[in-house]
Image (spheres, grey):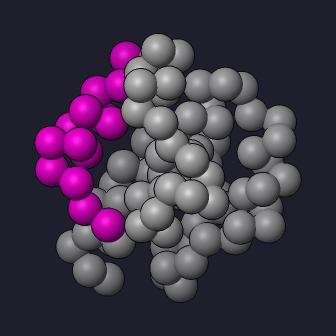
Amino acid sequence: MTEAQKKFFELLDQYPRFKHHWDKEKRTCDLESFDQDFKVMSSGERHMARFFISVWLNESETYPFNVLDAIRVIDDKSRKLVIVWLANPFFP
């Protein structure tokens, strides 16, 4: 596992709402289950889900993540996580 993947899973471990979509050992994400779950998430959860999937995929076209929109609605814990990541971004 790369250092970036380790960092990613350390962040993801803080969010049990999302982490079950990823298989740490196989280093994969089940996009089908992610899509289904995404439909029933709250606004803040959708923003953080977009953040994690965008970092994972190294793109934000599939699940657009907008920092300004997210910062308005996510909780303090999530806001701090995004800010720390923005200061030192990595992509698994």
Q: Position of residue 54 (x, y in %)?
A: 49, 57
Q: Please state if 31 lies on the left or on the right of 53 as rendered.
A: right
Q: Is residue 29 above or below residue 39?
A: below
81 relative position to 60: left or right: left
Looking at the image, is 19 positioned above or below residue 27? above
Q: Does the magenta run of residues contain 63?
A: no
- Whether residue 51 is visible, yes or no, is yes
Residue 91, x across and y down, in percent: 32, 67
Chief SS of the magenta region: helix
Query: Residue 6 is drawn in which quadrant?
Result: bottom left
Residue at 84% in and 53% down: 36
Q: Nearer the viewer, residue 50 or 60?
A: 60
The residue that appears at 47% across and 14% down in the rendered structure is 72
Q: Residue at x 50, y 24 (%)?
A: 69
| Residue nearer the viewer, 65 or 75 | 65
* Location of residue 19 (image quadrant): bottom right
Numbered circles on residues, count: 0
Q: Is residue 25 above or below residue 48?
A: below
Q: Would you say residue 16 is visible in this rendering? A: no
Q: Quadrant of the C terminus?
A: bottom left
Q: Position of residue 39 (x, y in %)?
A: 83, 41
| Residue plotted at (25% across, 45% down) | 85
Indicate whether 12 appears above or below 47: below
Q: Quick one: which residue is furthest to the front in this view?
A: 61
Locate the N terminus by quadrant: bottom left
